[in-house]
Image: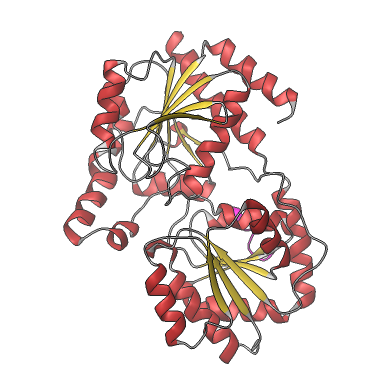
Amino acid sequence: MPDDHLAKIGDIAAAAGLKRIHVLAWRDLADVEAGGSELHVASIMEMWAQAGLEVTMRTSHAPGMPSDSRRDGYRVVRRAGRYLVFPRGVAAELAGRHGRRDALVEIWNGVPWFSPLWARGPRVVWLHHVHGPMWQMVLPPRLARFGELLERRVAPPFYRRSEVITLSESSRRELVEKLHFPDHRLHVVPPGVGPRFVPGSSRATRPVVVAVGRLMPVKRFGHLIDAMVRVRTDGGVADAELVIVGEGAERDALQAQIDANDAAEWITMPGRISDDELVALYQRAWLVASASIAEGWGMTLTEAAACGTPAVATDISGHRDAVLDGRTGVLVPPAELGAAIAALLRDHDRRREMSRRAREHAATLTWEATAVATLTVLAADAERRRH
């Protein structure tokens, strides 16, 4: 990280009297089910720690990981399961078991920590998107109805006076329209793109489409597989290939779908791969695709964009900011995903122009700027409370 950004973070924190920051998060980057939300948190915490802040992150237990450790300069406390982490994390903060703090960051990822009810002092909430239909896809019906009620009706009134950071303008509009958050309390801070994501020297000789994410229902990889079957059969791109990167509960079902379509020769699922392998895949691919039903941003799309790879994705909040429709990629309704992928695979000139614009757009997104902007919101809350 450039020294000027480190100095800026240090100056902002010092002016606001912030030295020790605690973070409450559902999952940790070391968790086998970690995704974009966890990468977002870890990237910012690393930079805050590099700037001299004492950061403690409390999260749930991750299999195979120690309950208390350090990563990239900050402390990670992993205790309790997926649901018990909420009451136990709050109890630990109230009892001071995580040590003293000058400010709190609550990451509201589906289930809130209700920090307005118990946390004193400077505080900010990170809320990436409204989960909405995701509840029905990941939980049994009764629990899903409870989750949706909690998100839409029960929790929002407690957060009306909280400063909330979200990732995109489209997500901000959803928070206003669906959760009725006051607009002046919402702050849009886009995620960054790591410096390792750069264009490669050449593309694959055959059309390759890559999709990256946790293999969970909300990502709708099954829908993408169906779309790619149509690309090869009806879309005029009979040699197209699909690579799905990631792990998750849907792996067996997706593999069964691939086998049922006799597609094992052209659809591969390598699981989790290294950072270098991911960059190389983005560089080789002709397109990156996402059939997701809900996203706060779509970080894999801008990572691919930095490698010069355009996107075809569902037209949802989050994607509308990560992808500039018609310029760095194409946004379509789910039913049109296959046709859009086929059309862009066939149109080399349009894809080449989108590649150039995708690189330009991604170049405006840095983790340094994200780390500074998120701390600025927290520091402003500290200043308001002081005066």
Quarter of the rendering containing residue 119: top left
Magenta stretch bounds? 322-326
Give the residue drawn at x 53%, y 43%.
39
**Prevalent SS, magenta region:** loop
Query: In the visual, does 211 lie left or right of 88?
Result: right
- 194 horizontally vs 23: left or right: right
Placement of 171 over or under 292, stated as above or below: above
Drawn side of residue 114 relative to residue 101, left or right: left
How many badges with numbers are in the image?
A: 0
Q: Is residue 153 left or right of residue 121?
A: left
Report the residue at 37% width, 64% height from top.
217
Residue 369 at x, y = what percent? 65, 34
Residue 315 lies, in percent from the top left, at 51, 64
Q: Is residue 41 visible?
A: yes
- The x and y percentages for residue 247 are 46, 60
Foreground pick, 95 / 319:
95
Q: Residue 328: in sight, yes or no? A: no
Q: Residue furthest left?
A: 142
Q: Would you say residue 324 sits in the magenta stretch?
A: yes
User: Which one is in front, 331 or 198?
Assistant: 198
Vertical relation: 233 (above or below) 68: below
Display coloring = secondary structure
Check if residue 284 falls in the magenta segment: no
**Quadrant containing the N terminus in the rendered view:** top right
Say which of 226 and 132 sits in front. 226
Near-viewer residue (340 or 19): 19
Residue 60 x %, y %: 34, 38
From the viewer's perspective, is residue 296 above or below residue 16? below
